[in-house]
Image (cartoon, rainbow, N blue to C red):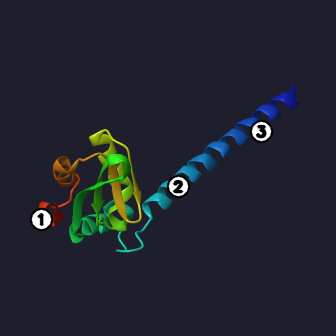
Amino acid sequence: MFQKKTEVRTHKKLNQRIRNSTVTISIMKKVNELAEICKNCGLPKEICVCGAIAKESSKIRVFAEKKSFGKWMTVVDGISEDANPKAVTKKLKTKLACGGTYKNGRIELQGDHTYKIKKLLVEMGFSEEQIEM
């Protein structure tokens, strides 16, 4: 009977150590998340302004091209890499309900959406002056 009590005590101690170590690990993860610093501006990732600066500095051209078999394609050209063009592509595809891709530094959307693109880009944070139709 004495052995069972010591086993129970050791299990309680082990459980307490495990709880303490998981708390320590979760605290360390939070510290590491807070300590992430942007490589470009040197600010913490939470308040990084690189994306906003990239959105303001680029000149964006929007035009439609006729592809093979008479299909139209809307092209958005001039979005810099700092403005996260893949996320912009995904949002445009969702809002316009069309297919498309980002390749060779430009966004290609299936169909002629030139009349809607400017409004959507302004909603995403790009200024109206930098969008050229």
- Numbered label attached to residue 81: none
Q: How packed is label 2: few (under 14 Cα within 10 Å), some, or many (20 or more)? A: few
Q: Earlier in the sequence, mark 3 or mark 2?
A: 3
The residue lying at 21 percent from left, 67 percent from top is 56
Q: What x and y, as percent, mark residue 64?
A: 25, 55
Q: Please state, as top left, top right, bottom left or bottom right, where the C terminus lies in the image.
A: bottom left
The residue lying at 16 percent from left, 48 percent from top is 115
Vertical placement of 9 versus 34: above or below? above
Q: Earlier in the sequence, mark 3 or mark 1?
A: 3
Q: Residue type at mark 2: give it.
A: Lys
Vertical placement of 44 versus 30: above or below? below
Q: How packed is label 1: few (under 14 Cα within 10 Å), some, or many (20 or more)? A: few
Q: Please state, as top left, top right, bottom left or bottom right, where the N terminus lies in the image.
A: top right
Residue wearing tag 3: 10
Residue wearing tag 1: 129
The residues tagged by marks 3 and 1 sit, at their Cα atoms, a distance apart of: 70 Å
Q: Residue furthest front?
A: 69
Q: Residue type at mark 3: give it.
A: Thr
